[in-house]
Amino acid sequence: MYNEIQMFLDVRYVSAPEAMWRIYTFEMHDMSHAIIKLFVHLPNMQQVYFNTNSTIPDVVERAATQHTTLTGWFALNTQDEEARQYTYVQIPYNYVWKITQTRIWVERQRHFNRIIPRYFVHPREDYIRRLNDNDLAYNYALAYINRYLALQGKSNRDFQLLLPTEPVEHLIEDEYDYDQSEEQEIANRNIPLLNQEQRRIFTDILLAVNENERVSHRLFFIKGIGGAGKTFLLNTLLTYLLGNNHRYIAICYTGIPASLLKMAKRFILLLCYRFHF
Ligand SMILES: Nc1ncnc2c1ncn2[C@@H]1O[C@H](COP(=O)(O)OP(=O)(O)OP(=O)(O)O)[C@@H](O)[C@H]1O
Protein backbone atom coordinates (compact mmCIF):
# COMPACT_ATOMS: atom_id res chain seq x y z
CA MET A 1 0.00 0.00 0.00
CA TYR A 2 1.28 3.46 -0.87
CA ASN A 3 1.54 5.54 2.29
CA GLU A 4 1.73 9.11 1.12
CA ILE A 5 2.55 10.58 4.54
CA GLN A 6 5.32 8.06 5.23
CA MET A 7 6.72 8.68 1.77
CA PHE A 8 6.83 12.41 2.47
CA LEU A 9 8.62 11.88 5.81
CA ASP A 10 11.09 9.42 4.30
CA VAL A 11 12.25 11.62 1.45
CA ARG A 12 12.03 14.93 3.25
CA TYR A 13 15.28 16.76 3.77
CA VAL A 14 15.50 19.39 6.51
CA SER A 15 18.48 21.67 6.06
CA ALA A 16 20.24 23.27 9.04
CA PRO A 17 18.69 26.74 8.46
CA GLU A 18 15.20 25.21 8.21
CA ALA A 19 15.78 23.14 11.35
CA MET A 20 16.78 26.26 13.31
CA TRP A 21 13.83 28.17 11.91
CA ARG A 22 11.46 25.47 13.09
CA ILE A 23 13.12 25.04 16.52
CA TYR A 24 12.62 28.75 17.15
CA THR A 25 9.04 28.34 15.88
CA PHE A 26 9.31 31.26 13.50
CA GLU A 27 6.44 31.78 11.09
CA MET A 28 6.73 29.58 8.03
CA HIS A 29 4.42 31.70 5.85
CA ASP A 30 3.52 35.32 5.62
CA MET A 31 1.58 37.38 3.15
CA SER A 32 3.48 40.54 2.48
CA HIS A 33 2.00 42.05 -0.67
CA ALA A 34 -1.32 41.96 -2.44
CA ILE A 35 -0.51 41.35 -6.11
CA ILE A 36 -3.22 42.56 -8.44
CA LYS A 37 -3.12 41.40 -12.03
CA LEU A 38 -4.18 44.00 -14.58
CA PHE A 39 -4.99 42.76 -18.05
CA VAL A 40 -4.08 44.68 -21.16
CA HIS A 41 -5.61 43.54 -24.44
CA LEU A 42 -6.81 44.79 -27.79
CA PRO A 43 -10.56 45.36 -28.35
CA ASN A 44 -12.42 42.03 -28.19
CA MET A 45 -9.18 40.10 -27.71
CA GLN A 46 -9.60 39.35 -24.01
CA GLN A 47 -9.45 35.82 -22.67
CA VAL A 48 -12.87 34.26 -22.21
CA TYR A 49 -13.40 31.31 -19.88
CA PHE A 50 -16.34 28.98 -20.27
CA ASN A 51 -17.61 25.64 -19.20
CA THR A 52 -17.41 23.00 -21.91
CA ASN A 53 -21.05 22.15 -21.24
CA SER A 54 -22.22 25.70 -21.98
CA THR A 55 -24.00 26.49 -25.21
CA ILE A 56 -22.40 28.88 -27.70
CA PRO A 57 -25.06 31.61 -27.21
CA ASP A 58 -24.44 31.42 -23.44
CA VAL A 59 -20.68 31.72 -23.92
CA VAL A 60 -21.12 34.71 -26.25
CA GLU A 61 -23.57 36.35 -23.87
CA ARG A 62 -21.23 35.86 -20.93
CA ALA A 63 -18.24 37.18 -22.85
CA ALA A 64 -20.18 40.25 -23.91
CA THR A 65 -21.35 41.13 -20.42
CA GLN A 66 -18.29 40.24 -18.39
CA HIS A 67 -15.65 42.88 -17.95
CA THR A 68 -11.91 42.37 -17.76
CA THR A 69 -9.97 44.63 -15.40
CA LEU A 70 -9.31 46.86 -18.43
CA THR A 71 -12.84 47.14 -19.83
CA GLY A 72 -14.06 47.43 -16.22
CA TRP A 73 -11.78 50.42 -15.81
CA PHE A 74 -13.22 52.02 -18.95
CA ALA A 75 -16.73 51.40 -17.59
CA LEU A 76 -15.76 52.84 -14.22
CA ASN A 77 -14.51 56.01 -15.89
CA THR A 78 -17.78 56.55 -17.70
CA GLN A 79 -19.71 56.60 -14.39
CA ASP A 80 -17.35 57.74 -11.68
CA GLU A 81 -15.73 61.16 -12.10
CA GLU A 82 -13.51 60.58 -9.09
CA ALA A 83 -11.91 57.58 -10.80
CA ARG A 84 -10.78 59.66 -13.78
CA GLN A 85 -7.92 61.18 -11.83
CA TYR A 86 -6.22 57.77 -11.60
CA THR A 87 -4.25 55.94 -14.24
CA TYR A 88 -4.94 52.24 -14.79
CA VAL A 89 -2.02 51.25 -12.56
CA GLN A 90 -3.21 53.57 -9.77
CA ILE A 91 -6.72 52.13 -9.80
CA PRO A 92 -6.02 49.09 -7.54
CA TYR A 93 -4.82 51.45 -4.80
CA ASN A 94 -8.21 53.13 -4.72
CA TYR A 95 -10.65 50.53 -6.05
CA VAL A 96 -11.15 46.81 -5.55
CA TRP A 97 -11.84 44.42 -8.40
CA LYS A 98 -15.06 42.69 -7.37
CA ILE A 99 -15.71 39.36 -8.99
CA THR A 100 -19.48 39.21 -9.02
CA GLN A 101 -21.77 38.27 -11.90
CA THR A 102 -20.54 41.22 -13.92
CA ARG A 103 -17.10 42.02 -12.41
CA ILE A 104 -16.64 45.67 -11.52
CA TRP A 105 -14.27 48.06 -9.79
CA VAL A 106 -15.73 49.31 -6.49
CA GLU A 107 -14.31 51.92 -4.19
CA ARG A 108 -11.68 50.53 -1.80
CA GLN A 109 -12.65 50.55 1.90
CA ARG A 110 -9.47 49.11 3.38
CA HIS A 111 -6.15 50.50 2.30
CA PHE A 112 -3.05 48.32 2.25
CA ASN A 113 0.36 49.88 1.96
CA ARG A 114 1.78 47.15 -0.14
CA ILE A 115 -0.08 46.53 -3.34
CA ILE A 116 1.72 45.49 -6.49
CA PRO A 117 -0.24 46.02 -9.66
CA ARG A 118 1.10 43.71 -12.37
CA TYR A 119 0.38 44.14 -16.04
CA PHE A 120 -0.41 41.12 -18.07
CA VAL A 121 0.01 41.67 -21.81
CA HIS A 122 -0.19 38.70 -24.11
CA PRO A 123 3.07 38.65 -26.10
CA ARG A 124 1.20 38.30 -29.38
CA GLU A 125 -0.90 41.37 -28.62
CA ASP A 126 2.15 43.24 -27.52
CA TYR A 127 3.77 42.66 -30.90
CA ILE A 128 0.61 43.55 -32.78
CA ARG A 129 0.11 46.71 -30.75
CA ARG A 130 3.72 47.78 -31.14
CA LEU A 131 3.77 47.15 -34.87
CA ASN A 132 0.12 48.03 -35.47
CA ASP A 133 -0.16 45.43 -38.21
CA ASN A 134 -0.99 41.72 -37.94
CA ASP A 135 1.05 40.52 -40.92
CA LEU A 136 4.04 42.59 -39.95
CA ALA A 137 3.87 41.22 -36.40
CA TYR A 138 3.77 37.67 -37.78
CA ASN A 139 6.77 38.38 -39.98
CA TYR A 140 8.55 39.98 -37.11
CA ALA A 141 8.08 36.84 -35.01
CA LEU A 142 9.34 34.60 -37.83
CA ALA A 143 12.39 36.80 -38.34
CA TYR A 144 13.00 36.87 -34.62
CA ILE A 145 12.91 33.06 -34.30
CA ASN A 146 15.00 32.65 -37.44
CA ARG A 147 17.62 34.94 -36.08
CA TYR A 148 17.94 32.97 -32.87
CA LEU A 149 18.06 29.69 -34.75
CA ALA A 150 20.79 31.09 -37.02
CA LEU A 151 22.99 31.44 -33.96
CA GLN A 152 22.79 27.66 -33.65
CA GLY A 153 23.41 27.11 -37.36
CA LYS A 154 19.75 26.37 -38.03
CA SER A 155 16.89 28.14 -39.72
CA ASN A 156 13.09 28.20 -39.50
CA ARG A 157 12.97 25.66 -42.33
CA ASP A 158 14.57 23.02 -40.09
CA PHE A 159 11.48 23.21 -37.89
CA GLN A 160 8.85 23.44 -40.62
CA LEU A 161 8.39 27.13 -39.92
CA LEU A 162 7.95 29.74 -42.63
CA LEU A 163 10.64 32.27 -43.37
CA PRO A 164 9.66 35.93 -43.07
CA THR A 165 8.09 37.09 -46.34
CA GLU A 166 9.60 40.54 -46.17
CA PRO A 167 12.75 41.91 -44.58
CA VAL A 168 12.06 42.98 -41.03
CA GLU A 169 15.60 42.73 -39.75
CA HIS A 170 15.71 46.44 -39.01
CA LEU A 171 12.87 45.97 -36.52
CA ILE A 172 14.84 43.58 -34.38
CA GLU A 173 18.11 45.42 -34.48
CA ASP A 174 17.26 47.15 -31.21
CA GLU A 175 17.43 43.78 -29.45
CA TYR A 176 21.18 43.98 -29.82
CA ASP A 177 21.52 47.62 -29.04
CA TYR A 178 24.23 47.78 -26.42
CA ASP A 179 27.56 49.47 -25.93
CA GLN A 180 30.28 46.85 -26.10
CA SER A 181 32.92 48.89 -24.28
CA GLU A 182 30.45 49.68 -21.49
CA GLU A 183 29.72 45.97 -21.07
CA GLN A 184 33.42 45.25 -21.02
CA GLU A 185 33.90 47.85 -18.33
CA ILE A 186 31.13 46.35 -16.15
CA ALA A 187 32.58 42.86 -16.62
CA ASN A 188 36.04 44.09 -15.69
CA ARG A 189 34.59 45.61 -12.56
CA ASN A 190 32.60 42.53 -11.52
CA ILE A 191 34.93 39.67 -12.39
CA PRO A 192 37.40 40.46 -9.57
CA LEU A 193 34.44 40.43 -7.15
CA LEU A 194 33.50 36.82 -7.92
CA ASN A 195 34.07 34.52 -5.00
CA GLN A 196 36.01 31.31 -5.40
CA GLU A 197 33.06 29.15 -6.35
CA GLN A 198 31.56 31.72 -8.70
CA ARG A 199 34.96 32.14 -10.34
CA ARG A 200 35.32 28.41 -10.89
CA ILE A 201 31.92 28.17 -12.58
CA PHE A 202 32.64 31.32 -14.60
CA THR A 203 35.90 29.85 -15.91
CA ASP A 204 34.35 26.46 -16.68
CA ILE A 205 31.51 28.03 -18.64
CA LEU A 206 33.83 30.33 -20.57
CA LEU A 207 35.89 27.33 -21.61
CA ALA A 208 32.73 25.56 -22.74
CA VAL A 209 31.61 28.61 -24.74
CA ASN A 210 34.81 28.46 -26.77
CA GLU A 211 34.10 25.95 -29.53
CA ASN A 212 37.81 25.26 -30.01
CA GLU A 213 38.30 24.10 -26.43
CA ARG A 214 38.06 20.39 -25.80
CA VAL A 215 35.88 20.16 -22.71
CA SER A 216 34.09 17.16 -21.24
CA HIS A 217 30.68 18.86 -21.07
CA ARG A 218 28.90 22.00 -22.18
CA LEU A 219 25.78 21.75 -20.08
CA PHE A 220 25.75 23.29 -16.62
CA PHE A 221 23.30 23.22 -13.77
CA ILE A 222 23.98 25.87 -11.17
CA LYS A 223 22.37 25.35 -7.80
CA GLY A 224 22.62 27.45 -4.66
CA ILE A 225 20.46 28.74 -1.83
CA GLY A 226 18.64 32.06 -2.24
CA GLY A 227 21.13 34.93 -2.25
CA ALA A 228 24.10 32.66 -2.98
CA GLY A 229 25.03 34.80 -5.99
CA LYS A 230 23.70 32.83 -8.99
CA THR A 231 22.19 35.88 -10.70
CA PHE A 232 25.30 37.94 -10.05
CA LEU A 233 27.45 35.21 -11.56
CA LEU A 234 25.24 34.79 -14.62
CA ASN A 235 24.99 38.52 -15.24
CA THR A 236 28.74 38.89 -14.95
CA LEU A 237 29.12 36.08 -17.45
CA LEU A 238 26.54 37.54 -19.86
CA THR A 239 28.08 41.00 -19.57
CA TYR A 240 31.48 39.52 -20.29
CA LEU A 241 30.12 37.74 -23.37
CA LEU A 242 28.53 40.95 -24.69
CA GLY A 243 31.72 42.88 -23.98
CA ASN A 244 33.64 40.34 -26.03
CA ASN A 245 31.24 40.33 -28.93
CA HIS A 246 29.68 36.93 -28.29
CA ARG A 247 25.99 36.51 -29.05
CA TYR A 248 23.88 34.51 -26.65
CA ILE A 249 20.26 33.65 -25.96
CA ALA A 250 19.24 33.84 -22.31
CA ILE A 251 15.87 32.19 -21.87
CA CYS A 252 13.80 31.99 -18.71
CA TYR A 253 10.54 30.22 -18.14
CA THR A 254 8.90 33.13 -16.40
CA GLY A 255 8.98 36.90 -16.46
CA ILE A 256 10.59 37.70 -13.10
CA PRO A 257 13.90 35.90 -13.72
CA ALA A 258 13.84 37.26 -17.28
CA SER A 259 13.74 40.77 -15.84
CA LEU A 260 16.74 40.02 -13.60
CA LEU A 261 19.04 38.54 -16.21
CA LYS A 262 20.75 40.64 -18.80
CA MET A 263 18.89 40.69 -22.12
CA ALA A 264 16.95 37.58 -21.19
CA LYS A 265 13.75 36.53 -22.90
CA ARG A 266 10.81 34.59 -21.68
CA PHE A 267 10.56 31.15 -23.26
CA ILE A 268 6.99 31.83 -24.31
CA LEU A 269 8.02 34.89 -26.33
CA LEU A 270 10.03 32.66 -28.61
CA LEU A 271 7.22 30.22 -29.14
CA CYS A 272 4.00 32.17 -29.00
CA TYR A 273 3.70 32.77 -32.73
CA ARG A 274 4.35 29.20 -33.75
CA PHE A 275 1.71 27.75 -31.47
CA HIS A 276 -0.58 30.78 -31.09
CA PHE A 277 -0.65 30.53 -27.31
N1 LIG B 1 30.71 38.09 -5.78
C1 LIG B 1 29.86 39.04 -5.42
N2 LIG B 1 30.30 40.28 -5.14
C2 LIG B 1 29.45 41.26 -4.76
N3 LIG B 1 28.14 41.10 -4.59
C3 LIG B 1 27.63 39.89 -4.85
C4 LIG B 1 28.45 38.79 -5.28
N4 LIG B 1 27.67 37.72 -5.45
C5 LIG B 1 26.42 38.11 -5.15
N5 LIG B 1 26.40 39.40 -4.78
C6 LIG B 1 25.24 40.19 -4.33
O1 LIG B 1 24.51 39.39 -3.40
C7 LIG B 1 23.11 39.56 -3.56
C8 LIG B 1 22.45 38.20 -3.82
O2 LIG B 1 23.00 37.65 -5.01
P1 LIG B 1 22.10 37.08 -6.20
O3 LIG B 1 20.86 37.88 -6.40
O4 LIG B 1 23.00 36.88 -7.36
O5 LIG B 1 21.71 35.67 -5.55
P2 LIG B 1 20.84 34.48 -6.17
O6 LIG B 1 21.59 33.22 -5.86
O7 LIG B 1 20.55 34.74 -7.61
O8 LIG B 1 19.56 34.58 -5.27
P3 LIG B 1 18.06 34.01 -5.56
O9 LIG B 1 18.16 32.53 -5.69
O10 LIG B 1 17.31 34.43 -4.33
O11 LIG B 1 17.59 34.71 -6.81
C9 LIG B 1 22.92 40.53 -4.72
O12 LIG B 1 22.74 41.82 -4.17
C10 LIG B 1 24.25 40.45 -5.47
O13 LIG B 1 24.53 41.68 -6.15
Image (cartoon, rainbow, N blue to C red):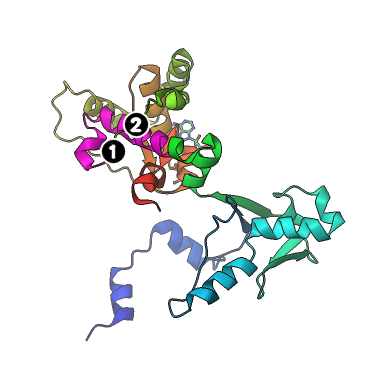
Q: Position of residue 163 (x, y in %)?
A: 29, 34
Confirm or deny contact between disc 2 and disc 1 (CB under 8 A).
yes
Front in this rendered view, residue 39 or 162 = 162
Left/right of residue 124 with respect to residue 43 in the rendered view: left
Vertical arrangement, residue 24 with respect to residue 206, above or below: below
Q: Kindly report the distance in space between the C-alpha atoms of the residues bearing marks 2 and 1.
A: 8 Å
Vertical arrangement, residue 65 with respect to residue 244, above or below: below
Q: Position of residue 216 (x, y in %)?
A: 13, 33
Q: For the residue labelled by badge 2, is the local secondary structure a helix, a strand or a loop?
A: loop
Res 94 visible: no
Q: For the residue labelled by badge 1, is the local secondary structure a helix, a strand or a loop?
A: loop
Vertical arrangement, residue 71 with respect to residue 22, above or below: above
Vertical arrangement, residue 261 with respect to residue 47, above or below: above
Check disc 2 and give the amino acid type. Thr
**Magenta stretch in the rendered image:** 138-161
Residue 220 within the magenta-colored segment of the rendering = no
Q: Residue at x 34, y 51 (%)?
A: 275
Residue 145 within the magenta-colored segment of the rendering = yes
Left/right of residue 268 with respect to residue 67 in the rendered view: left
Q: Residue at x 43, y 27 (%)?
A: 172
Q: Quadrant of residue 232?
A: top left
Q: Which mark, by number, is residue 162? A: 1
Res 186 visible: yes
Q: Position of residue 193 (x, y in %)?
A: 44, 26
Q: Residue at x 41, y 39 (%)?
A: 138
| Residue designated by label 2 | 165
Q: Position of residue 263 (x, y in %)?
A: 44, 32
The residue at label 1 has a CB less than 8 Å from ligand 1: no
